[in-house]
Image (cartoon, rainbow, N blue to C red):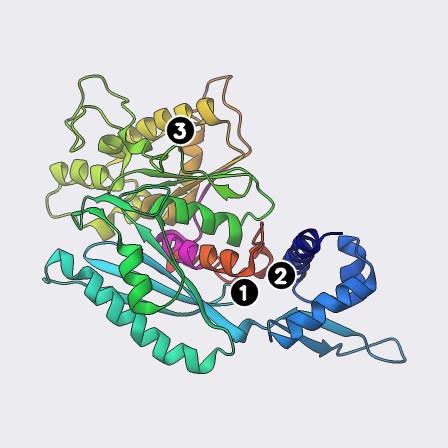
Amino acid sequence: MSKANGQLMKTMNRRLLIETIIEHGTISRSELARKIGLNKSTVSEQINGLLEEALLIEEEATASSGGRKPIFLKINRQAGYAIGVDVDHPQILVHITDLLGETLEVRTLHLEDEPIDHAMDVLIKALQDIRSTYDKTHTPTGLTGIGIGIHGIVRNDQHVVFTPKLQWKDTNIQQRLEEEIQAPIYIDNNSNLSAFAEQALRFSSTEDLFCVTMYSGIGLGIVKNREIYRGFQGFAGEIGHMIIESNGRLCPCGNRGCWEGYASEKAILARLQEVDDTLQPQEIPGLLQSGTHMDVFNSFFDYMSIGLNNIINIFNPETIILNGDILNQNPHVISQIEVRLKSKMNHYKRIEPSHLGKHACALGGSMVALKSFYGIHQLNLSQYEYHENLAKTI
């Protein structure tokens, strides 16, 4: 075997070992060798290296049937940490997670009345402060990387094309952040990261997952074969600008009748405030529980089903996650959407509300950073159930 082939084989074996240990939580060397089909000497060589890096730790079983207690391996979750960021306006949400994806801290950065282009300065200061704290407590690896979600268009090379709220245009924020923070930086669209978080933290056995984010507009994150699908240049998922009404309402994109003008939470709020101008956004989820203004909500269900019907017929996804406060707080009404999907051509496995809610994007950023750090193909954390029903804490 050539030196290059030998190194490739070691890299593949390391990936398989790490993926299997993460999936099982704790596992013995013999069981590890059996599950991935490697001989015990190969496994021991790799494990010894990972122990020296402090990426793994060993622990003795608490009970045994007699004789020597078995030794189990597990990820040393305190050896390092990752950061996920949801860059929005007027606030930026930051999740700090350990090496197994559990949230250590959540920080909310309020931009208030500062100039919009000042958001980067606020973010950099916060990230530097996080490093000064967690680099001391999570050693020897420290910061593994930072995943950042942008509410706008991001090219495949991580270049930000445009963000409507922050008005960033044709800018390379990745370069500046890497220079300032001295860590790997991963930039992606917020819907992509939301979908990746759902797949890694809740649906690890699902290869094809779609996540529809419905807050100010509508975005679509696509995970295909456990990888984020971005399209030709990274513009995939702008599903909110699918036209569902010919000559309908004017959209800021320039077209008329775009889906997000009828089925986003911003659009629902606008319709409800036409009926009651004192209504506040946080009151909307409760209206469904009281049955108030159901004519507006029935219209929303109709328009939501039209868009989902198109998505299902075009892509045939296995799982669709709907992420918006209204549905996250009222999961029972998803049946009102599904009953409207009457076409015999509709084939999917499940439609569910998000359990991660507005935290999904930031958590997805952290998950992307962890996956890259480990060099693995699949990050399977759904068995840990750290973030169950996180959406209901908003």
Earlier sequence position, callout 1 versus callout 3: 1
Q: Which residue is mark 3?
A: 308
On the picture, is 355 further left or further right than 170?
A: right
Which of the 4 quarters of the picture holds residue 311? top left
Earlier residue among tags 2 and 3: 2
| Residue labelled with disc 1 | 100
Q: Is residue 35 left or right of residue 272?
A: right
Q: Nearer the viewer, residue 269 or 73?
A: 73
Q: Mark 2 sits on what residue?
A: 22
- Numbered disc 3: secondary structure: helix
User: Callout 3: 10 Å neighbours few (<14), some, many (20+)?
Assistant: some
- Amino acid on which the number 2 mark rests in the picture: Ile
What residue span does the magenta drawing correspond to? 351-366
Amino acid identity at mark 3:
Leu
Report helix, strand or loop for mark 2.
helix
The image quadrant that residue 294 belongs to is top left
Q: Residue at x 21, y 24 (%)?
A: 257
Considering only order in the chain, which callout, 1 or 2, is on the residue closer to the N terminus? Answer: 2
Q: Which corner quadrant of the image does residue 94 belong to?
A: bottom left
